[in-house]
Image (tube, helix red, strand yellow):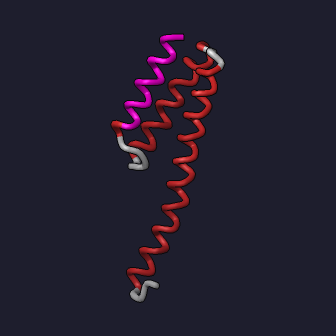
Amino acid sequence: MANTKSAIKTTRRIQRQTVVNRSRKSKYKNALKKMNFLLEKKNKKDALSFLPKLNSELMKVAKTGIIKKKNASRNISRITKKINSL
């Protein structure tokens, strides 16, 4: 257990930030799942309309460091290719 004032404050801050990061990560994962569901249904119109929202979610989590920027770019690229191939 932390035994200095600054260490106690740090653990409290980390606990708060963990909750925020978890919620952001689950938002991004749910967005990916929704897009994959639309792609499985071969629903190009809905997938195209959902693509900007997915890009926004991915870039938000990449900006905050929850995932790496190249990971977000790779996901966007692969999904865009799948949509174009429908």
Whole-percent x, y for residue 70 in the image: 34, 36
Question: Which residue is at a point 48% across and 62% down the rendered structure image?
Answer: 17
22 or 49: which is nearer to us?
22
Task: Check residue 72 for magenta coloring.
Answer: yes
Q: Magenta segment, principal secondary structure?
A: helix
Question: Which residue is at a point 57% across and 24% down the rendered structure image?
Answer: 50
Question: Which residue is at a point 59% across and 13% down the rendered structure image?
Answer: 44
Q: Which residue is most to the front?
A: 40
Whole-percent x, y for residue 68 in the image: 36, 43
The residue range painted magenta reads: 71-86
* Residue 36: quadrant of the picture: top right
Viewport quadrant of the C terminus? top right
State left or right for residue 14 relative to residue 73: right
- Seen in the picture, residue 25 relative to 12 is either above or below; the reply is above
Whole-percent x, y for residue 80 in the image: 46, 20
Q: Which residue is most to the left?
A: 70
Question: Which residue is at a point 50% across and 25% down the rendered structure image?
Answer: 52
State left or right for residue 28 relative to residue 43: left
Whole-percent x, y for residue 13 in the image: 46, 69
- Seen in the picture, residue 49 relative to 73 is either above or below; the reply is above
Task: Check residue 31 for magenta coloring.
Answer: no
Q: Which residue is most to the bottom?
A: 3
Report the label total: 0
* Residue 38: quadrant of the picture: top right
76 or 60: which is nearer to us?
76
State left or right for residue 44 relative to residue 75: right
- Seen in the picture, residue 58 relative to 12 is either above or below; the reply is above
